[in-house]
Amino acid sequence: MALVRSVRSTFSPEIGIDLGTANTVIYERGSGVLLCEPSVVAYDGDDSVMSVGRAAKEMDGRAPGRIRVVRPLRGGTISDFRAAHVLIRTLVDRALNARPRLIPRIVACVPGCATDIECKAVEESARAAGVRATTFLPQAVAAAVGAGVDITTTQGRMVVDIGGGTTEIAVLALSGVVAMESIKVGGDYLDNAIAARLHAEHFRIGPLTAEALKIKLGFAGRPPGRAPARISGFDIVAGAPRSREVSETLVGEAMAEGIDRIVRAVWAVLEQTPPDLSADLLEGGITLTGGGAQITGLAGELALRTNVPTVVAPEPLVCVARGAGEVLGSPTLLERLGPSADRLSRWYQSLRIGMRESYSP
């Protein structure tokens, strides 16, 4: 039996995909992270795909008019179906191109705020990319598993996954979701806030510069005292390109509203949590995952404002994809997560049964 599973995984791989607004991460159990690239597609004209992933992102804000740079996902869900098909197909092929294989099976992670129609778009994109079967899993559940949090016990554990488009907060116990909140605030929201703050000072910057400022100077809570960063952009008053220094205080002020929304969402989940499980969190704490978990001081600020110990998971950026791959590679865990996962699969099954009954002679 073990030999059969080994042969099947070699030629028909089972992979976890975190199809994120900012990055797509592909993970295979036993092999680790196969790929982590930006969720960006660049077109030369209307139809010709020019590049996908990192190369496409480098064109964002720099490309001439004939080159169209597209982010297929907004707020954690697909906004451009055609570009999403290209993104998934290209990155799956890129991740698995080193070996002969049959059609892969995937676990795709979706935000808690995703509707059935949005989930359907993900499955159709995966099918267009040549995936034989798609299982859905809430991002927060996958993030917890990928962070090494044991969600099968009676002890309540909380995970906060801060991605590019959404922040997912969930309290988990006995392989189920006890309380969950999903808000459309993530890394992109913070980038836009930084760009807007500088625009209010009559200085315009592009998305890549805003992201670089967030990574270099972003923080939550007290400023750590880092030196200003010099950036280049467009001085609206002078009507010409200029360079200027940006302090970490300015960046922190720009990010403060978004950070506050995340903290308030965590509080909302804590208020929904049964008292006994809330007490468990004083011991188990909050685990931060996702790219936003790396914001300087965020774990400390969250712990201070919620009175719950907070830690950042190891390799937070890949926790969701790793968790998806681990769940798919563990049939027992996948079965336990059944009530939380495959929401769309059950919806599809009922739809197909209804269609068969409607069209049966």
Image: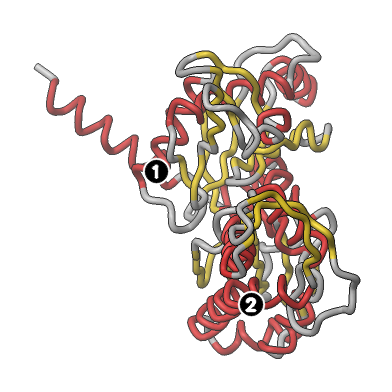
Is label 2 in a helix, a strand or a loop? helix
Name the residue furthest front.
238
Q: Which mark is residue 256?
A: 2
- What's under tag 2, amino acid-wise? Ala
Regarding residue 86, the answer to whether it shows in the image is: yes
Quadrant (top left, top right, bottom left, bottom right) of the C terminus: top left
Regarding residue 146, the answer to whether it shows in the image is: no
Q: Position of residue 271 (x, y in %)?
A: 51, 86
- Name the residue located 59 percent from the left edge and 38 percent from the top edge: 107
Q: Position of residue 97 (x, y in %)?
A: 75, 15
- Could you tell me how many numbered marks the image carries? 2
Quadrant (top left, top right, bottom left, bottom right) of the N terminus: top right
Which residue lies under the disc numbered 1? 118
- Name the residue located 63 percent from the left edge and 74 percent from the top edge: 259
Q: Earlier in the sequence, mark 2 or mark 1?
A: 1
- Name the residue located 43 percent from the left edge and 40 percent from the top edge: 79
Q: Position of residue 51 (x, y in %)?
A: 65, 22
Q: Quadrant of residue 277?
A: bottom right
Is label 1 in a helix, a strand or a loop? helix
In front of the other: label 2 or label 1?
Answer: 2
| Residue 179 drawn above or below residue 210 | below
The reply to whether discs 2 and 1 touch (Cβ–Cβ < 8 Å) is no
Query: In the visual, does 49 lie left or right of 47?
Result: right
Asked whether 104 or 111 is in front, the reply is 111
- Name the residue located 55 percent from the left edge and 58 percent from the top edge: 166
- What's under tag 1, amino acid-wise? Glu
Q: Position of residue 163 (x, y in %)?
A: 63, 55
Q: Quadrant of residue 170?
A: bottom right
Q: Which mark is residue 25?
A: none
**How many other residues sit within 10 Å of disc 2, few (<14), some (14-19) or many (≥20)?**
some
Name the residue furthest top.
100
